[in-house]
């Protein structure tokens, strides 16, 4: 449309996600015209530092030249082809590369487009596995409170936040919820490891009571993202793996938010120590299903996948007449462009020691927010890799939150975006948790800007 006319019509027809549309009357949308590196550029030319990597996807910044070049070349060759009965090089090559970097034993890749679809597929595959192997009663799921796995019905059912799920509760088959190992409310002086370990008793009890009817346990490893960037110790995952093996229940790890380097290692699973197997030998940690998305394509195109084992795959491999096939499909499954973006992302990972670079970024972020550790309205500053979360509280000593109606997090967002007329920083707190999940390419000046802005915005939002 001429003269940026589209901006005036932005909400005439488009219904926006995660948005109460009435709020737009007083808090207008931010029109974005272009993006480069760690920066979004407003239609009026104002730059915004993307400190949360556009919903945690943009691991190498926007329009990374290698991803752009690979996509342009792919567009000249093959845009899309359905994947039932057909195949193409990008899907095959990406699957091969993924199998080489994930925990051992995850040898099969099933593609989809979005994170929630990957979660649906993992849940269905697990339940279907038990049908195919003669245990049809094993059809429920266990999950931990305050988790998030996406918003299609199956995925939403295993989410733990009321504000996402309550209106749809009659539509769900309820999972079994157990208290989270998240360390925010641990007793004073207790280590993360001891607290997460002690919380495992709830999971053990649920497995003892329900293993016969449970297909799988699904969790976000180490960081409960949309639940407020709550964090826990890897010992919980080790105990969980061992207990799932003992109880003959699958373990689904949703690495959609934390995979591809976010936690300081390529996958959150890589933090977990070897686990006891059925025969009591120690084996490298691996889930039965791993869900990936977001950083999978460097945040450029929608793609997700579920990775699983030969044992699971084998339970579906039979003559068609046996009726055991996994017939799930999405129209754009394994889209060639998305798979090429995935290949490009993995090639960029190979070009540099990003984990070493991220350790420096993480350290500088930690130092940059030092004043917030003694702020009168900050109850905790926590970090896992390049995820740094700052929890605001009305009373930090008792962890008393602000009333939601005060919309303190909206104040943080607006101050960071609009407080300075020349330049903004995209911080989009979850509840009262302000956090950074920047692209890995951020330089020192950008990290310092993020930290300064967060401090100023939190000061502003907690004043009075
Ligand atoms: C851990 C986790 N799982 C699943 C999802 C859902 O992904 P999508 O929004 O692509 O459906 C998200 C999205 O934030 C997530 O953080």
Image (cartoon, rainbow, N blue to C red):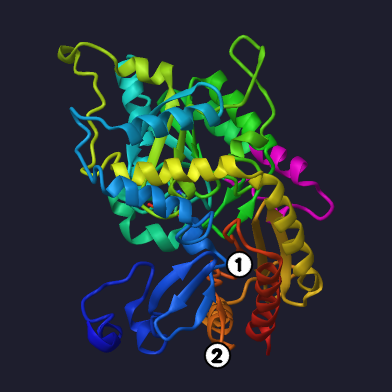
Asked if the stretch drawn in magenta spans residue 192, the answer is: yes
Q: Reply above or below: 446 against 91.
A: below
In this view, the residue in front, 141 or 82, is 82
Question: In the displayed structure, does residue 445 sit left or right of residue 7?
Answer: right
In this view, the residue in front, 186 or 391, is 391
Q: For ligand 1, tell me if the residue under mark 1 lies within 8 Å.
A: no
Question: In the displayed structure, does residue 238 sit left or right of residue 208?
Answer: right
Farthest left residue?
321
Q: Reply above or below: 236 against 183.
A: above
Q: Reply above or below: 295 against 8.
A: above
- Can residue 397 be seen here? no
Residue 110 place in picture, x, y as percent: 35, 32
Location of the N terminus (image quadrant) = bottom left
Marks 2 and 1, how far apart in space?
24 Å
Q: Which mark is residue 228?
A: none
The structure residue drawn at horizontal position 80% and vertical position 73%, both measured from the top left corner, is 371
Residue 226 place in picture, x, y as percent: 51, 58
Start-end of magenta stretch: 179-200
**Disc 2 and disc 1 in contact, CB within 8 angstroms:** no
Q: Which mark is residue 433?
A: 1
The structure residue drawn at horizontal position 69% and vertical position 42%, both measured from the top left corner, is 233
The structure residue drawn at horizontal position 68% and vertical position 67%, both measured from the top left corner, is 447
In this view, the residue in front, 413 or 304, is 304
- Can residue 56 be seen here? yes
Question: In the displayed structure, does residue 84 sit left or right of residue 252?
Answer: left
Q: Reply above or below: 254 against 49.
A: above
Farthest right residue?
189
Question: In the displayed structure, does residue 331 sit left or right of residue 231?
Answer: left
The structure residue drawn at horizontal position 49% and vertical position 20%, both measured from the top left corner, is 248
Q: Which mark is residue 421?
A: 2
């Amino acid at each position: 449309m001429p003269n940026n006319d589209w901006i005036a019509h932005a909400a005439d027809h488009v219904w926006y996600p995660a948005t109460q549309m009435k709020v737009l009357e007083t808090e207008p949308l931010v029109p974005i015209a272009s993006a480069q590196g760690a920066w979004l550029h407003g239609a009026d030319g104002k730059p915004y530092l993307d400190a949360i990597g556009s919903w945690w996807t943009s691991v190498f910044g926007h329009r990374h030249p290698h991803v752009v070049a690979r996509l342009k070349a792919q567009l000249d060759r093959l845009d899309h082809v359905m994947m039932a009965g057909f195949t193409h090089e990008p899907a095959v090559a990406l699957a091969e590369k993924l199998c080489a970097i994930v925990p051992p034993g995850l040898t099969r890749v099933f593609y989809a487009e979005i994170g929630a679809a990957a979660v649906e597929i993992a849940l269905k595959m697990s339940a279907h596995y038990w049908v195919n192997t003669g245990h049809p009663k094993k059809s429920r799921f266990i999950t931990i409170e305050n988790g998030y796995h996406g918003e299609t019905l199956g995925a939403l059912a295993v989410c733990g936040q009321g504000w996402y799920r309550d209106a749809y509760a009659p539509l769900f088959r309820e999972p079994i919820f157990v208290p989270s190992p998240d360390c925010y409310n641990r007793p004073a002086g207790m280590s993360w490891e001891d607290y997460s370990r002690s919380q495992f008793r709830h999971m053990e009890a649920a497995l003892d009571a329900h293993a016969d009817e449970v297909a799988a346990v699904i969790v976000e490893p180490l960081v409960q993202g949309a639940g407020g960037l709550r964090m826990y110790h890897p010992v919980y995952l080790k105990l969980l793996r061992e207990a799932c093996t003992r109880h003959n229940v699958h373990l689904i790890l949703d690495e959609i938010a934390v995979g591809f380097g976010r936690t300081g290692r390529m996958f959150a699973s890589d933090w977990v120590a070897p686990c006891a197997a059925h025969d009591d030998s120690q084996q490298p940690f691996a889930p039965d299903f791993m869900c990936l998305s977001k950083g999978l394509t460097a945040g450029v195109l929608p793609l997700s996948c579920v990775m699983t084992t030969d044992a699971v795959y084998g339970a579906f491999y039979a003559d068609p007449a046996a009726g055991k096939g996994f017939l799930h499909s999405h129209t754009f499954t394994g889209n060639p462009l998305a798979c090429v973006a995935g290949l490009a992302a993995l090639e960029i990972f190979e070009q540099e020691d990003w984990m070493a670079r991220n350790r420096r970024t993480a350290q500088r972020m930690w130092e940059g927010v030092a004043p917030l550790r003694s702020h009168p309205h900050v109850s905790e500053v926590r970090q896992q890799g390049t995820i740094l979360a700052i929890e605001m509280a009305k009373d930090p000593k008792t962890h008393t939150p602000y009333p939601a109606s005060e919309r303190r997090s909206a104040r943080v967002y607006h101050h960071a975006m609009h407080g300075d007329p020349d330049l903004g920083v995209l911080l989009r707190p979850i509840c009262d948790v302000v956090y950074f999940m920047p692209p890995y390419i951020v330089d020192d000046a950008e990290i310092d800007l993020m930290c300064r802005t967060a401090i100023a915005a939190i000061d502003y939002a907690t004043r009075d």
